[in-house]
Image (cartoon, rainbow, N blue to C red):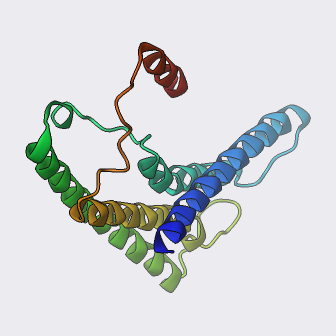
Amino acid sequence: MIRRLLDGLYLAAGWLAGLFLISIFVLMMLLSIGRIVGFNIPSGDDFVAWAMAASAFLGLAHTFRSGELIRVGLVTDRLRGRAKRVVELGCLVIGTLTVGYFAWNAVILNWDSYRFDDISQGVVAVPLWLPQLGYSVGLVMLAIAFADELVHALRGGEPRYEKPPPASAEEVVERAMQSGV
């Protein structure tokens, strides 16, 4: 039950990131067309920037769990057996602590913005805690995903964030095409 809940949470964050990506497109198109026809969206650039941050951070947990987050496997790809497991666990511990630290501070920043009633300096006055939610929620979700993966690995499971090596030359080409190479 918890597994389904967490996977649903990661998927929901990914969908939300996608919706923010669509909002960036819509706002950019409206801003571009608005310049031609003499229509202006007040603080439009601010809204686009906030949507970019929300899209990037909300998509992290889903990207991590899908095995699409960029990893440098120069060391781990060459290791086998117990040595690989120890290095993977060490990386997961460091990653969990690091992301947890950033998530904690993002939540504190968000709370302080709410508590002190920080307002944006653009044409449209927006309480800053609102656009900061995407940043802090995204980091909290990534911290949960790291902790989830760490617990899974400590219980003896194989890393779920790592895709298996390609089985054929066609699969190598297909993965390269999917990644945009």
Residue 168, x across and y down, in percent: 41, 18
Establish if 179 lies above or below 140. Answer: above
Tally of numbered tags: 0
> What residue is at 63 percent from the left and 57 percent from the top?
16
Q: Residue furthest left?
A: 83
Residue 121, x across and y down, in percent: 59, 63
- Camera sees residue 181: no
Looking at this view, is 164 or 103 the one in front? 164
Establish if 168 lies above or below 152. Answer: above
Q: Residue furthest right?
A: 37
* Residue 75, quarter of the rendered image: top left
Residue 144, x across and y down, in percent: 39, 67
Residue 174, x across and y down, in percent: 51, 21
> What residue is at 59 percent from the left and 55 percent from the top?
50
Looking at this view, is 55 or 97 the one in front? 97
- Camera sees residue 60: yes
> What residue is at 69 percent from the left and 52 percent from the top?
19
> What residue is at 44 percent from the left and 80 percent from the top?
112
Residue 75 is left or right of residue 170, and the answer is left
Establish if 44 lies above or below 120. Answer: above
Looking at this view, is 171 or 74 the one in front? 171
